[in-house]
């Protein structure tokens, strides 16, 4: 199954683990496992003992101590190699923004698994790295590091809808495909530092790229920067930089540029954890540059006092809208996670207004995990061309019940809108199980449809291949830029 793509995953742990450390990594709770229970007494724990033990040379269902003893004998390098190769994933998209230093980086994942591993950048982590400095310059600093990592040059406008995506959604302006001059855009071939001085793509984007419906120009002028710099709706300036990219190839400097600026892997997408840091009920509109500077000032004063953690919703909205400017697929944490996320504000239905405002950009939005709101995600994916989702993480934690979750994900969503992910973080057992449990659940569910005469075998195989990898290759354009 080398064609499968794990479109949201983190690195495997690169160090040996004690039993307590291992148990704390197989639960989403951030509290220590109480002495009177074991994390192995769970669907995930039982799945590890059932499916991972044979990969380490043991019979299924060993005692946890025996399993961990075997794990220690083999050592983490061999454990990672065995489990990642047995996972059989064809390509990993590795999100590096959470405690990445403790884990294998994309190159390490590729070496251990034998499969290519690209990168997903976490917006909030990137912003926290560039936070120090003046508030007025924050937007430029963030855009400079973000745009320096883009894998696609302006000759391939990434903001355009992928083939078959949103055919009925008109671009926000007729200039989209016309190759109209992109005044204010960095000239192709500009090096990253020059991006900042060119005034784009951050502070030079003074207003909402897509004003809220019903928001009249005078109101924009009231709350935005000086009217003279306001773009008029319908002009090229009104578009985001990604959408403004001219079709004609620019000087070869930009296109041929080494996309591994900063030493990282190829960036295939971006991710936001606004669900953790605020909630999915954020104001969906793009903040003005004045609002961003004011909010950045508040945050940076906290940074000066040692509080780097970004929780300001205005700054995060700016990150999200800047992410849309890149045209790269944007992942949202949705639903289950550790107790740092308030599940009451992690329901994807809260994203409805943002989804609609973002729709004209054609940027795919990937709702991650989603459990227990995966049926809500399925309905959003059903309604909106730009919405995709997965049930990663929930598959691992539901173990022998994973087929119920997978079956529910196959209810109302079009099959082209579902992707496979493991969301594994840490022990390579999670990477292996994410793939193994999903395959078993998927096979069980679609085999049932075939046995009941509802689906043909050909349909079952086709949908399995779509969700396993084909959809990810289309959304992240993996085949166009291998
Ligand atoms: Zn994740």
Image (tube, helix red, strand yellow):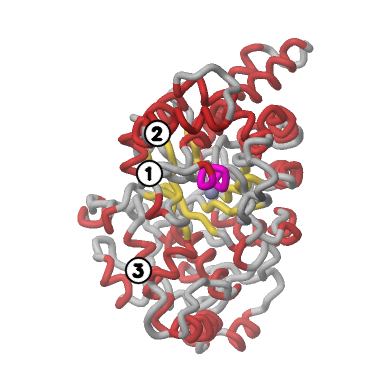
Disc 3: which residue: 144
Q: What stretch is highlighted in magenta?
A: 20-25
Question: Closer to us: mark 3 or mark 2?
Answer: 2
Q: Where is residue 166 in the image (x, y as percent from the top left)?
A: 60, 45
Disc 1: which residue: 14
Residue shown at 63%/45% (left/top)? 369
Q: Are marks 1 and 2 in contact (CB under 8 Å)?
A: yes
* Residue 20 shown left or right of residue 43 in the figure: left
Residue 220 located within the stretch drawn in magenta = no
Circle 3 packing at 10 Å, graded few (<14), some (14-19), many (20+), is: many
Q: Do the residues labelled 3 and 1 touch (CB within 8 Å)?
A: no
User: Main SS of the magenta segment?
Assistant: helix
Comes first in the chain, label 1 or label 2: 1
Question: Closer to us: mark 3 or mark 1?
Answer: 1
* Residue 196 shown left or right of residue 204 in the figure: left
Circle 2 packing at 10 Å, graded few (<14), some (14-19), many (20+), is: many
- Residue 80: numbered disc: 2
Residue shown at 55%/33% (left/top)? 434
* CA distance separating discs 3 and 2: 35 Å
């Amino acid at each position: 199954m080398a064609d499968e793509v794990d479109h949201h995953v983190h690195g495997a742990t690169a160090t040996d683990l004690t039993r307590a450390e291992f148990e704390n990594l197989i639960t989403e709770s951030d509290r220590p496992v109480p002495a009177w229970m074991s994390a192995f007494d769970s669907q995930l724990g039982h799945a590890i003992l059932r499916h991972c033990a044979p990969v380490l040379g043991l019979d299924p269902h060993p005692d946890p101590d025996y399993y961990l003893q075997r794990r220690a004998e083999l050592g983490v390098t061999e454990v990672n190699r065995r489990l990642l190769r047995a996972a059989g994933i064809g390509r990993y998209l590795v999100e590096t923004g959470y405690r990445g230093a403790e884990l294998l980086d994309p190159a390490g994942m590729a070496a251990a698994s034998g499969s290519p591993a690209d990168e997903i950048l976490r917006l909030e982590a990137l912003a926290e790295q560039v936070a120090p400095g003046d508030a007025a310059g924050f937007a430029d600093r963030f855009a400079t590091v973000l745009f320096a990592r883009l894998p696609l040059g302006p000759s391939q406008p990434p903001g355009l809808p992928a083939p078959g995506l949103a055919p009925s959604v008109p671009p926000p302006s007729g200039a989209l495909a016309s190759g109209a001059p992109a005044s204010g855009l960095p000239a192709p071939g500009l090096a990253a530092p020059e991006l900042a001085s060119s005034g784009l793509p951050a502070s030079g984007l003074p207003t909402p790229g897509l004003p809220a419906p019903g928001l009249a120009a005078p109101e924009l002028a009231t709350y935005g920067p000086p009217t003279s710099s306001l773009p008029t709706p319908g002009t090229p300036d009104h578009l985001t930089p990604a959408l403004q990219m001219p079709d004609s190839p620019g000087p070869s400097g930009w296109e041929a540029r080494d996309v591994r600026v900063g030493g990282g892997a190829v960036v295939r997408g971006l991710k936001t954890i606004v669900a953790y840091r605020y909630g999915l009920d954020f104001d969906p509109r793009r903040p003005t540059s004045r609002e961003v500077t004011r909010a950045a000032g508040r945050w940076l004063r906290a940074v000066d006092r040692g509080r780097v953690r970004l929780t300001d919703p205005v700054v995060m909205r700016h990150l999200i809208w800047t992410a849309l400017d890149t045209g790269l697929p944007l992942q949202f944490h949705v639903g289950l996670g550790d107790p740092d996320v308030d599940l009451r504000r992690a329901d994807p239905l809260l994203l409805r207004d943002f989804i609609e405002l973002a729709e004209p950009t054609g940027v795919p939005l990937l709702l991650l995990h989603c459990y227990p709101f995966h049926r809500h995600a399925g309905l959003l994916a059903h309604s909106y061309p730009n919405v995709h989702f997965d049930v990663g993480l929930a598959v691992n934690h539901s173990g022998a019940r994973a087929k119920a979750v997978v079956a529910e994900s196959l209810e109302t969503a079009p099959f082209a809108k579902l992707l496979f992910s493991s969301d594994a973080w840490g022990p390579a057992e999670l990477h292996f199980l994410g793939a193994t449990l999903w395959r078993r659940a998927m096979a069980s569910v679609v085999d049932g449809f075939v046995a009941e005469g509802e689906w043909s075998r050909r349909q079952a195989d086709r949908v399995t291949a779509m969700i396993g990898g084909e959809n990810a290759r289309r959304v992240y354009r993996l085949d166009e830029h291998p």
